[in-house]
Amino acid sequence: MRRFTTILLLILLITLLSGASLAQTPRYGGVLRRSLINDPPTLDPAMITDTASDEVARQIFDGLVEYNPEGKVVPVIAKSWSISKDGLTYTFYLRDDVYFHNGRKVTAEDFVYSIKRVMDPKTASPRANFADPIKDIKAKSKYILEITLKEPFAPFLSTLTYSCFWVVPKEVVEKLGKDFATNPVGTGAYIFEEWKHDVKVRVKANLKYFRGRPYTDAIEWAIIPDEQVDFLNFEKGLLDITGIPDTEWDRVSNDPKYKPYIISKPILGIYYLGFNVQKKPLDNKYLRWAITRAINKEEIVRVIRRNRAEVAYTILPPNMPGFSKGIYNWAKENLSYNLEEAKKLLEKAGYPGGKGLPELTIFYNTSRAHQRIMEAIQANLAEIGIKTKLQNYDWAVYLDLLDKGELPIFRLGWVADYIDPDNFLWVLFNSGNFGEAGNHSFYKNARVDELTNKARKVSNWNLRVKYYNEAEKLILEDAPIVPIFYYVSQPIHQPWVHGLYVDPLTGLSGVRYRVVWLSK
Amino acid sequence: MADELILQQSIRKPRSLWKIAWKRLVKNRLALVGLSIVLIIIFIAIFANYIAPYDPLKVDLSKYLLPPSREHLLGTDEFGRDILSRIIFGARVSLQIGFFAQVISISLGTVLGLLAGFYGGWVDDVIMRIVEILFAFPFLLFVIAVVAVFGPGIQNLYLAVALIGWAGVSRIVRGQVLSLRERDFVASARAVGAGTLRILFKHILPNALSPIIIEATLGMGGMIMLEAGLSFLGLGVQAPTPSWGSMVQAGLAYMRSAWWYPVFPGIVIMIVVFGFNLLGDGLRDALDPRLYI
Amino acid sequence: MYRYFIRRLIQMIPVFIGVSLITFALFYIAPGDPARLIAGQRADPEVLAQIRKSWGLDQPWYVQYIKFLGRIVRLDFGRSFKTNIPVLESILERLKATAVLALFSFIIAVGIGVSAGIISAVKQYSIFDYSAMVIALLGVSAPVYWIGIILLLIFGFKLGWFPLGGYISEYGLKAVVLPAIALGTRPAAYFARLSRSSMLEVIRQEYIITARAKGVPEKLVIFKHALRNALIPVATYAGMVVGDLLTGAVLTETIFAWPGLGRLTVQGILDRDLPVIQGTVIFIAFIYIIANLVVDLSYALIDPRIRYE
């Protein structure tokens, strides 16, 4: 009798399981529930610089092109494009079936307006510099847009995926003025519906969307400032997709209830410890090397990050085109954790056993997660006799001090704005970018400058890779930063969520949710 | 004004009450409990080196979040540090913050309150206007602003408290002075030609002391809580220095997987603040049974 | 009474000026540049200059301050640097949430606190008295976020009685219960201690003893004669509590995802968003002053002997 029941149950289970797989045909309807850690500052594409705003606005707006989940530039409102031989003129052929949410058709003039608006000093767009390479932009006809550049700029097409180049309707922007930021109108798969500040933002499906209506009827973001409370909400089934706090990772990732629903994907970002190479005593290359080899990043990733990141040895993350396995292996051999080598290097630097070295301060911006990593690094350095203390500041002060070069040792992260080595090697290490422009190490190497400048202007990809590889190795040898880990995005979703992918650049905040559907 | 109203109802007898007060205090069982808690924690703070079983800063990642055991009575934290040892050394940090913050705000408040009450006139006007302005700032938000802006750390916490914390004390002291100023013993001191300073510190201050002591004792608990609150926002003492507040804050994130981490430091905060409050209450009953709050 | 009211209102002006000047000064001494924060980790120097110019941040501080005063007189709080939303609009939106939370916390604090205190006083040295006072002391001894998380874990997560944070617009009045308890615990404990000692004080006074001696029933003595007088210091404290509840709830708001003024202010501080900081600080000062004024006026209702000249 008992055996019979078991068999019956088994049959039932198999039916259910196969039923589940049959149910893989996408279903329309439902409300997707997400959360944000803070209220988005703005939904005006010209003003966006943070991930919360980006995630919401990305559902409402479209640009000429975007990245697909594999990180390739694909058409959106531009059907196709051509680039002149000299790399100066970009011609975009636009779709003729794209409408703003207010019902008006999108033409090339709208892009002229939107991009000129970003360039206009009166707009005071924080991303106006993204439009710097542009010399002129005009509508050749209703659906043909022509952009000419001041000089060749290889990553230009990639940069056009950025939020500041999304198209906005002139008449609405001019009517609403500054209030456009809280009443956005775009062309996207979702239409802005409601925003209760510090409570929630809601968008509803754009049923006439030119790429087909999104699966869900609406998306709702609850604003939940506490990470732990956020995860409690997920566990109660009140959120469909969210991030997992490091501190909950062991429990969640070992729970069969949750395990199948965790997505894990490396994104284009790096977490690093930087030095101001012009400041004593860190102008000493051997001291920087000693610190590099004293930091046990394998252990930091394993114990502190619970393996939720990938140990980094290079500046370019592995998924970045131009990443070199050769450099990776070389750095893993020569710049990784090795106590004996670190001690020798410290002696070579003139501080045997740390003697004669003043107490150093490691700076970080206020966050419990950063603090944990800095505490581990502090303990590592103590092993070879380098005494350090920790000091945190809030982001405002931190940026200020970084820009002025007042922080000798600091932590930073860098996540790609666009998929091109230029966004890492030129931005962070070209001496033309000292301070706020990105080079917070105040690193200057004439050859690196030459290579990163040249590589921007050349259109031959193989040649560019050659330049970037040479530059990256030179930088690593000078050790202005210690790469700690490459970021990995690891969101979790409920069993009834399907079709979720993770944006290759930024993770969850870069997802277009129109392809996600709910089976509940 | 609200505070004057209370103070008028609480005119005190001018004679010194110290001995009687001590007798009253030791008769009050709850106050004795408070006193013992406070003394024990002070003892622990002073002799932390000898009591703590481990180095509170010793990182050993192989001991990541171990539950309480014979080896680690209260378990370990995410760096493998012994939680009991960190609590013991944390007593130093937390008490130090409470003590110095109180010393700063009480001495500033006392001096300014004495001046305002004794001189009256424009001195009083200026000081009391400033007090009113400071009162209009919410204390916690002000401290958050100062610490966020100038960087977290004990010094800036003191700075914030020094800037704003004295206002309450100065009001109390001023009220005391007002009620004492016209008393016989002050008048007679003046008659025999005592200088202003002498009158202030020799005659008026000792008689105004009991509300200050009560305020100081009760305020200790408040300061320990303030540090805990700032830690929640990442604005507490610098890591890796252990303070109870920063331990609770760090531990709360592990509530579901390592309950011992947030719970033990939290209980310690409760017991110690409880101790200071009991003692403060007892002192109030003993020193001046007719004072409110 | 009327003239007293007017005088108090006029006295508010220097407080406002002082408060705004201190805020302004702090903002200017402080390192950190709001334009830089908007631009993020990497910024173009020209773009930064442009943003500063568009907000008038390139002018000397006293010019900015005078302009600010000029706007405030017209009740124009300006727009947030960061979000471009009119500050007054932001404040009024948060004020609703803050007021609801404060009201419920206040009801909990006064309801539980005062009644426990009075019973304790009437039954001095009873078991009720001792346990109520120990609980009250423990209540003021626990960090609010510690209580908050534990309440959420037990009553929100394990038992599922209340939402896991969130506002009443989403979850109805249920949403206010846990944050109100977390926020109301400390003032409840204070109220209990205060009303107990105040009541004890009054009971010992001669007119109560006389009333009892004259054979007035005990209930009448307590409720008619003693209570009214014992409530004066309680009312004083109530004024302070209302001020605190309306402004000091930032930790509670963070844990319970409550869209209140505290979070707005702290976000403003972190963003160096001067218009938001100025707006909220002045608003909070206003609330504080009004609360005190109401308390002072309420003395007249409680105790007819108090008159305002």
Image (tube, helix red, strand yellow):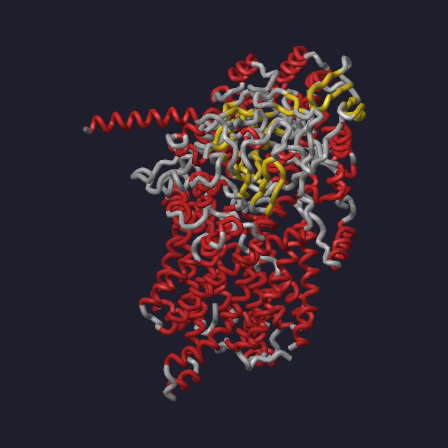
Q: Is residue B175 left or right of residue B284?
A: right
Residue plotted at (22% across, 26% down): A4
* Nearer-the-camera pick, A29 or A169: A29
Q: Nearer the viewer, residue C307 or A90?
A: A90
Left or right position of B44 against A239: left
Residue B138 is situated, as x and y percent measured from the top left of the image, at 58, 57
Q: Position of residue B20 (x, y in %)?
A: 40, 73
Q: Position of residue C33 (x, y in %)?
A: 69, 42
Looking at the image, residue B174 lies above or below residue A40: below
Please tell me which residue is depicted at 66% across the width and 70% down the height of the picture.
C8
Residue A402, by quadrant, is top right
In this rendering, the answer to whether C31 lies above or below B220 is: above
Nearer to the camera, A487 or B126: A487
Report the number of discs: 0
Quarter of the view holding residue C116: bottom left
Please indicate, yes or no, whether residue B130 appears anywhere in the rendered image: yes
B262 and B20: which one is in front?
Answer: B262
Residue B40, above or below A40: below
Residue at screen point 56% across, 19% down: A319
Location of the N terminus of chain A by quadrant is top left
Placement of the C terminus of chain A among the 4 image quadrants: top left
Position above or below: B187 against A33: below
Which quadrant would residue A431 be assigned to in this image? top right
User: Residue A34: x and y, percent?
Assistant: 52, 38
